[in-house]
Image (cartoon, rainbow, N blue to C red):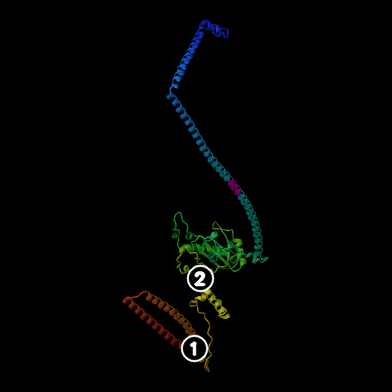
Amino acid sequence: MAMKYTDKGLSSGFMGSNDLFLGSRKQWRKYIKKTRRKKIRQKLAQHRDAAEAKAEALRLADPDYVMYLREREQLERMASEWEEERRRFENALWLDREKEAQSLFAEKRQKLEEEQRDEKEKRDRIRKEFEEMEMKAKAAKAEKERLLQEFLKKQQERERMFAEYLVGIDDHLPVLRESSHSRPDRNPCVFFGKVGACRFGVRCSSDHAIPGLSELLLLPNFFAHPALDHQQHPEYGLDSSIEFDDDELYRSYTEFFMDVIEEFESFGPISGFFVTRNFEPHLRGNVYVQYEKVRDAAKAYQRMNGRFYASKQLRVEFRAPIVWTAAVCGLFERSRCQKGKSCNYLHLLVNPVAKYRYDHFKELQSARQSQRQSQRSQLIERSWDDVDIPAKQRANWRWSETPEVEQPSHKSRSTSTTSGLRKNRSRSRESADSSRNRSSSSRRSRSRNRSRHRSRERDRREEKQKRHSRSRSRSPERKKSKTKKKKRNRSRSRSSRTSREKSKKKSTK
């Protein structure tokens, strides 16, 4: 049943509840239109639902449509089951991935914890090592301070003893002569022991022993001259020594010598004064002053150390006694030194005063004579059984020197009455003894030569046999050359035999 709407009914229905529409007609009309449209829409929806229900009933009456609905329902159910299976599979995959991720996260966390633990241990170890190093450094510093204090005490005590020794109150020679070593656990430096200086200085790997007291004083680089300067000059370059000749060098050295020798002689008598003209920095201009007495050298050391000469502070050091024949370059004395500016043996300047002039060959000859005399005295005092010969020298006995042994004088067979005949006989005996000694030495040398010749002949024969065994056939030219060599050897042996026979005849005469 359709419901009729009138303005009166609408007004009666809403006037009591709300007085909103009393003052506005426009709003009232708007509300009426809205409700009318709503009713129309509801009515249309009802008609549509009824038509759809009727059509649905007609479709349900159709068996094909019912079959279609069943199939669609079955497909929807299968799709839902497949979706559920896919969801479960994806969930299982997600769980596996989550498990792997959790395990990886656990491994990473464990690794991170291990790294943190290792880092902590490393920091603790470094801190511990640093603390140990600090403790060692403190201990080393304390030990260094203690050693420094001990050294200062020893130095003060040594200075006191040195002053007492200079004055003559007491002689503390054993204490003052103690040597200081740069490297006590190493072998001694050969060149430092020979010339008193080393090209490597404090960087040398060998030991440098410096005596506390000695007759020899060393003043390093005391004498200076541009001719000895081996450094690069801004004006002359490396050839600065060309600008100065030896005459100018010796003139300046003469002035230096006359200026210095008086000062050193004021402390006591000097046995040697040596100045080097080497170009190497450790030997350039070194001055060696050798006193006759140790006390005079000590006085010079105390007075000259720290003084200034030619705007340069002097540094005086003690050195062990030097064998000058071994330290001085003999080739330079003959003007034949092949090393030139790089020679590490002493090249000495000639002193202008003959008293301090060094003659190398005279000193060398006297040293050799003293050595021979000492060897002869040893041979006279000891027998051959007592002489200690090294094993290497025993093995090379063929090359050892023959000792000079005096032959006992033979008694005269006949006596004469005149003194002149006796003198002549004694002279003849001396000449005979000397000839016998010469013949004995010549026999020894011959025996050595024979033994050497025999050994060489044996070696040659063995080599020939080996070559003959190796080579099956030989050319005639080689045979001719070998026969020529044999003839030469035979002629040489014959000539040597004839010379030996002549020498024997002369010795018997």
Picture coordinates of residue 125, whole percent (x, y): 60, 49
Q: Residue at x 52, y 37 (%)?
A: 92
Report the span colored magenta.
116-126
- Outermost residue toward the left? 476
The answer to whether residue 263 is visible is no
SS majority, magenta: helix
Q: Secondary structure at mark 2?
A: helix
Q: Secondary structure at mark 1?
A: helix
Q: Which residue is mark 1?
A: 428
Q: Nearer the viewer, residue 359 or 331?
A: 331
Q: Nearer the viewer, residue 317 or 113?
A: 113
Q: Nearer the viewer, residue 92 or 401?
A: 92
Picture coordinates of residue 394, whole percent (x, y): 52, 76
| Kind of residue indicated by mark 2 | His
| Kind of residue indicated by mark 1 | Ser
All told, the count of numbered labels is 2
Count neighbours of disc 1 (C-alpha within 10 A) and say few if under 14, some if 14 to 19, many if 20 or more.
Answer: few
Asked if the stretch drawn in magenta spans residue 121, the answer is: yes
Rendered position, 10 above or below 483: above
- Residue 360, label in figure: 2
In primary-sequence order, the first of circles 2 and 1 is 2
Q: Nearer the viewer, residue 371 or 278?
A: 371
- Outermost residue toward the right? 169
Picture coordinates of residue 123, whole percent (x, y): 59, 47
Count neighbours of disc 2 (C-alpha within 10 A) and say few if under 14, some if 14 to 19, many if 20 or more.
Answer: some
Q: Quadrant of the C terminus?
A: bottom left
Picture coordinates of residue 397, whole percent (x, y): 50, 77
